[in-house]
Image (cartoon, rainbow, N blue to C red):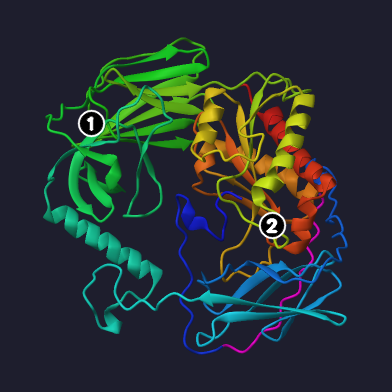
Amino acid sequence: MPLPRLVRAALALPVAAGLACGGSTPAPAAPVPVIAPPRPADPAAAGAPAARNTLPPVPDVDGPLAVKVVYPTPNQQLTSRDSNFIFGSVGSGKASLTINGVPARVYPNGAFMAYMANPPASLPRYDLVAVRGADTARAVQNIRYPAVATRSIIDPTPRKPDALPKTHADTIAALNARIDSLRSAHEPIGLVQLGTPVAADTDGYVIGKPIAGGTYKWFFTPGTVVPLMARTGGSARIRLDTGLDVFVDSADVHDVTAVQRPRVASNARVRGTAYGEDVIIPIGARAPYFVEEHDRAIVVTLYGVRGNTDIINYASSDSLIRTIEWMQVNDERARVTVNLRSAPYGYLVLQENGNFILRLRGRPAIDASRPLAGLTIAVDPGHPPIGSTGPTGLYEPQATLPVGVRLKRILEERGATVVMTRTTDAAVALGDRPIIARKANVNAFVSIHYNAYPDGVNPFLHPGTGTYFFRTHSEPLAREVQRMLVPQLGLEDLGINYDNLAVVRGTWYPAVLCEGAFIMLPDQEAAMRNPEFQERYALGIANGLESYFRALPAR
């Protein structure tokens, strides 16, 4: 899984936690039984392989009786409102189990999973009793609840209850109002440089966010100089232009004393490259920017830049580019629209020698009868670091690697060259994985994961298969991979999802992340150890890649 749903805050994008448990004690709830996955719609009609619809049987295990809780961990802070899951193993599939007096299902391999009412705040613990014949094993798992918030997240001054934001929308509105008031009330306090200048490369960037500690939205080239408006805790508020302030981490800003040179976008040109074409726009100093992809265009917003483009020199009649247009949006914002002859396939942004360069990637030549032949595909077995763990202790990185190895074999049999981001259990940093792919000039990137739900979500209701993307040009690949994965794995179709995940932020190639099944569910965790299920997972991804490239037009 991309960010283990149980520890998602460990990565870039925090997830809002559930409300703290109240003082009242909800009535005990019986564990919810597993809901059988729905039968996928007729895949043959869509050209996909026939659905299998069943997981491999859970193997029988009758070992020593011992209760082991995998989640929650000892003294784990639960963030759910009233109910949550607990899972682990008891060592024997022939045992019975109760949790706080409520029967819980034990699977043939000794794993268990229950979704039940949270323990009362006055006694925050789970009491587990496993019985097999005359043998009994017990365990106690203590938990914690968050402290009840008593202050506004906007202003530390105590307020009356009726003055607090009532909804999430009210909270965001209050945040934005606060940002607007700060912007209008203050002038820049100096200039700062974002990060440290690096070689002409997109592997290093400084992340901009709409609110302090918020979602990743802007990716600035290190060495860009911008006005500093304020420092707030671990964040710095910077000004892109008079109409927009954003937040970056304080560690990414460095004071500068040099006067900022005016940035003016002058006459542009297009040049051919080995892989496509470059749009070269002289602007002087590095500028903050934002890139948007459209159906047949890429739009670049340049902040703190005045447009003064008179002549644009195009490459040739066989260009990827139809036309380039520019407009001055306001006093400090220029917008450049690059109209293409087909949808974008990949791009890079570089800033070198006073030029802003948009490097466009041409599409590979495809043999429809053997569409993967000659292509280079990056296969990324998800994690480590971090990763989720199943009820019997299967660690996600251990489960994804066999699928990656099988996928490599299948892709090579179909004519592709495969770049593996890891082939051992050694950790590979999240940020290094897309760098490996870009340096290998891959034609596509696929990351293999297994999923888990966060606190408060009933995992029995929708335990299925999903595919994730971030860049617009990756969406068609996500759809084809998902379409081929679902009938292979036979689980519920959870669709494709836009998600700001580190390994799929690369722009030079289409990139997707697959969540084949839920490692927290005992029957699905057991399937992950099964070679036949691993093969099905790999085959679904390979078929999706093949289907995507077969349909990729030459332009």
Q: Image check: 271 left or right of 389? A: left
The number of discs equals 2
Q: Mark 1 = which residue?
A: 305
Which quarter of the picture shows residue 425? top right
Select label 2 or label 1 by which is in front.
2
Instruction: Label 1, secondary structure: give it.
Output: loop
The residue to which callout 2 is attached is 519
The spot of residue 158 in percent (x, y) is 23, 78
Cβ–Cβ under 8 Å for marks 2 and 1 = no
Q: Residue at x 57, y 37 (%)?
A: 474
Identify whether 30 is placed above or below 185.
below
Hey, what amino acid is under mark 2? Ile
Q: Which residues are magenta?
A: 26-42
Magenta stretch contains residue 362: no
Q: Identify the amino acid type marked 1.
A: Val
Tell which of 216 and 365 is nearer to you. 216
Magenta region, main secondary structure: loop
Q: Position of residue 336 (x, y in %)?
A: 34, 29
Give SS at disc 2.
Answer: loop
Figure quadrant of the C terminus: top right
The residues tagged by marks 2 and 1 sit, at their Cα atoms, a distance apart of 49 Å
